[in-house]
Amino acid sequence: MRVLQVLSQAVQSDKIVVVELSRRGDAGQIQSYLGQLTGARTVPRVFVGGSSLGGCDDTLAADRSGALKKMLVQAGAAL
């Protein structure tokens, strides 16, 4: 929820895609794929402009440092 809160304040709402694994029957498969793709199966996994930013701690740190804003501007998704 913290990541979604940060992103909803920084990203155009039509640019956010949320996949709720708790509501899917293929959650385990998705987490396995995330593990292959990013090296981590934990959620949330945040992607900006097609690149993996990381999980919750990574996203919050990027927000605090200003790096998230720069990434969002480059991806054309910043408010």
Image (cartoon, rainbow, N blue to C red):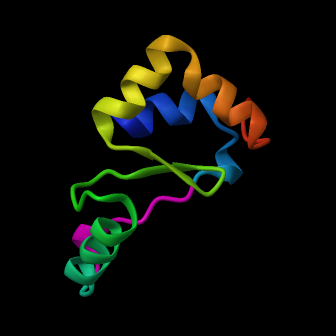
Classify the position of the N terminus by image quarter.
top left
Question: Front-most of 29 and 24?
Answer: 29
Question: Front-most of 23 and 56?
Answer: 56
Tell me if 49 is positioned left or right of 19 in this view.
Answer: right
Most distant residue in the top direction: 65
Tell me if 20 is positioned left or right of 50 in this view.
Answer: left
Whether 40 is among the magenta residues is no
Q: Position of residue 35 (x, y in %)?
A: 28, 66
Question: Front-most of 69 and 22?
Answer: 69
Tell me if 3 is positioned left or right of 22 in this view.
Answer: right
Most distant residue in the bottom direction: 25
Q: Quadrant of residue 42?
A: bottom left
Q: Is residue 1 above or below residue 19?
A: above
Q: Which residue is found at the position 34% from the left and 65% from the top?
A: 20
Q: Quadrant of residue 41?
A: bottom left
Q: Which residue is found at the position 46% from the left and 28% from the top?
A: 6
Q: Which residue is found at the position 34% from the left and 67% from the top?
A: 34
**Prevailing SS of the magenta stretch:** loop
Classify the position of the C terminus by image quarter.
top right
Q: Position of residue 71 (x, y in %)?
A: 65, 33
Tell me if 14 is positioned left or right of 40 in this view.
Answer: right
The mark tally for this picture is 0
Q: Is residue 67 above or below residue 76?
A: above
Q: Which residues are magenta?
A: 17-24
Q: Is residue 35 above or below residue 4?
A: below
